[in-house]
Image (tube, grey):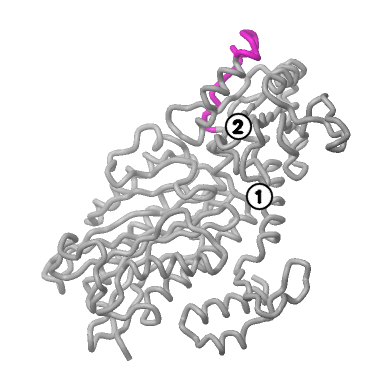
């Protein structure tokens, strides 16, 4: 992170911690607009821990080019797809859309048909970036990533004499020409009954394409199955480094939220923390892919007793489920805190032991989720090792990345602990990420044996070599919230 970015982030945290506004304004750097000029007096200073939107777009465009060059050739060869066709219409985009388009593209253009052709497959030569031809029938080149084809029809001089965009049946006719020139043995399409990520081809587009291709080419259509799934899931080392910074910021903001700088025991409600988080994320120029949640466990009280929006009290165990979205990447994190009672300096030993059980589950998960295994295989191993250690809990881990609940194998669901048919049968691959999500339930002596659930979630990276690590770190101590000082 650049020094100027650190200064900006320090300023934003100062505001979040209640530093007087006048002092914060004095500490803030002069706001700069995108042309490099000092902004006009009175304009608010920007809070940009991850740079401007323009800087992020340049970074994402570089990722896009490299991801397609790095992953797509090997994936097409691995799954036996000579030509992959991905047609879509505006506002009915295929789930793979955001993995193959530029950050400045928010929707398909009228209809866009993306075509990927492996020129080296027939010769049996090794796959590489130069082997894959990328064509867009309709739409744009996406910053030079695709060869964008336009209509042969020229529009009159009133609009500059440009060629018209491809439209309607003209697009299907051009697709037939592209296919006929390349003569693929297998044409991959995104159709699946298991994963939504593989099932982006709408019935109308399939009907139109099949009719245009005719029986000779239609018989070569094959469900692409894991090709789109694994392309969406695959991440670059540069993205891993960025993701680590995202997780570090989530940690920083979580620790601030779970502290006496934000919480006043006896006054603050859980909904106050939810909206504190939403506002801080928004103020920092980021988004979130789900509404955050904060809940309470209290000695002698049930969830029904506490209600939907309890006031936080000394002695409470707090739990948050939070995420941020930056540059099309998403995080997913669950953290825990304890509100100290008067005279306490630490959480009770029983609560710390309960957290340690969840930590043990995390350790086991990192060892069992590895390339080459299915999600169901990893789930079975985790649960078996938990049982051997006498830990009661559940495992419900999911991939993450371009989507919060991302492309790849599920490792359990909270209500499917015997395995997840279909979605748990996909295989873990290198260069993908997971949110290690789980909970351990442990009786706590200081609470009269009342079971306390320690639900944790931290993002994990599997790198290109198959090595596993936390994106940032995992929580092995409860955040402590003190009362009024």
Q: Quadrant of the C terminus?
A: bottom left
Toward the bottom, the furthest residue is 485
Q: Nearer the viewer, mark 2 or mark 1?
A: 2
Q: Earlier in the sequence, mark 2 or mark 1?
A: 2
- Answer above or below: position of 317 versus 467: below
**Which circle marks residue 248 in the picture?**
none
Which residue is denoted by mark 1 in the rendering? 103
Residue appearing at x 48%, y 57% in the figure: 288
Residue appearing at x 71%, y 45% in the figure: 65
Residue appearing at x 46%, y 47% in the figure: 399
Can residue 117 be found in the magenta stretch?
A: no
Whether residue 132 is visible to the viewer of this picture, yes or no, is no
Left or right? Give the position of 148 relative to 108.
right
- Residue 70 location, quadrant: top right
**Residue 425, position in %: x, y?**
41, 34
Provide the residue span drawn in magenta.
211-226
**Residue 128, position in %: x, y?**
73, 36
- Answer above or below: position of 328 versus 204: below
Left or right? Give the position of 401 relative to 438.
right
The residue closer to the viewer here, 347 or 103, is: 103
- Label 1: few (<14), some (14–19) or many (≥20) C-alpha neighbours in 10 Å: many
- Answer above or below: position of 129 versus 303: above
Whether residue 419 is visible to the viewer of this picture, yes or no, is yes
- Residue 322 location, quadrant: bottom left
Q: Secondary structure at mark 2?
A: strand
Toward the top, the furthest residue is 215
**Which circle marks residue 89 in the picture?**
2
Can residue 223 be found in the magenta stretch?
A: yes
Residue appearing at x 68%, y 29% in the figure: 115
- Residue 166 location, quadrant: top right
């Amino acid at each position: 992170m650049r020094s100027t970015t650190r200064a900006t982030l320090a300023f934003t945290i100062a505001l979040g911690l209640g530093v007087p506004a006048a002092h914060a304004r004095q500490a803030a750097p002069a706001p700069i607009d995108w042309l490099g000029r000092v902004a006009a007096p009175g304009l608010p200073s920007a809070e940009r821990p991850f740079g401007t939107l323009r800087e992020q777009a340049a970074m994402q465009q570089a990722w896009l080019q490299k991801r397609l060059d790095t992953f797509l050739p090997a994936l097409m060869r691995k799954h036996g797809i000579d030509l992959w066709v991905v047609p879509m219409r505006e506002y009915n985009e295929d789930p793979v859309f955001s993995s193959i388009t530029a950050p400045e593209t928010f929707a398909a253009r009228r209809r866009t048909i993306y075509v990927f052709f492996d020129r080296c497959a027939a010769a049996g030569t090794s796959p590489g970036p130069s082997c894959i031809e990328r064509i867009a029938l309709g739409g744009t080149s996406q910053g030079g990533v695709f060869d964008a084809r336009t209509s042969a029809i020229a529009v009159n001089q009133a609009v500059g004499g440009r060629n018209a965009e491809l439209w309607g049946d003209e697009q299907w006719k051009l697709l037939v020409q592209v296919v006929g020139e390349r003569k693929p043995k297998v044409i991959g399409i995104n159709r699946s009954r298991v994963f939504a990520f593989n099932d982006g081809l709408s019935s109308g587009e399939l009907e139109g394409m099949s009719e245009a291709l005719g029986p000779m080419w239609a018989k070569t259509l094959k469900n692409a199955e894991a090709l789109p799934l694994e392309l969406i899931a695959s991440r670059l080392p540069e993205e891993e480094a960025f993701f680590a910074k995202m997780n570090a910021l989530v940690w920083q903001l979580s620790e601030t939220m779970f502290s006496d700088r934000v919480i006043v025991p006896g006054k603050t409600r859980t909904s106050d923390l939810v909206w504190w988080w939403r506002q801080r994320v928004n103020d920092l120029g980021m988004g979130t892919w789900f509404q955050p949640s904060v809940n309470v466990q209290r000695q002698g009280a049930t969830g029904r007793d506490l209600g939907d929006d309890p006031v936080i009290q000394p002695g409470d165990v707090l739990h948050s489920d939070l995420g941020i979205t930056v540059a099309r990447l998403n995080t997913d994190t669950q953290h825990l805190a304890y509100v100290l009672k008067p005279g306490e300096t630490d959480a009770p030993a029983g609560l710390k032991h309960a957290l340690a059980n969840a930590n043990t589950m995390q350790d086991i998960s990192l060892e069992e989720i590895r390339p080459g295994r299915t999600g169901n295989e990893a789930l079975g191993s985790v649960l078996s090792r938990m049982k051997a250690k006498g830990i009661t809990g559940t495992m419900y881990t999911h991939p993450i990345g371009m989507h919060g609940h991302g492309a790849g194998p599920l490792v359990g669901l909270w209500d499917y602990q015997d395995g997840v048919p279909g979605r748990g049968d996909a295989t873990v691959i290198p260069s993908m990420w997971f949110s290690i999500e789980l909970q351990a339930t442990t009786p706590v002596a200081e609470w009269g044996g009342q079971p306390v659930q320690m639900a944790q979630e931290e993002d994990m990276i599997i790198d290109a070599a198959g090595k596993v690590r936390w994106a940032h770190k995992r929580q092995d101590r409860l955040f402590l919230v003190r009362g009024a000082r």
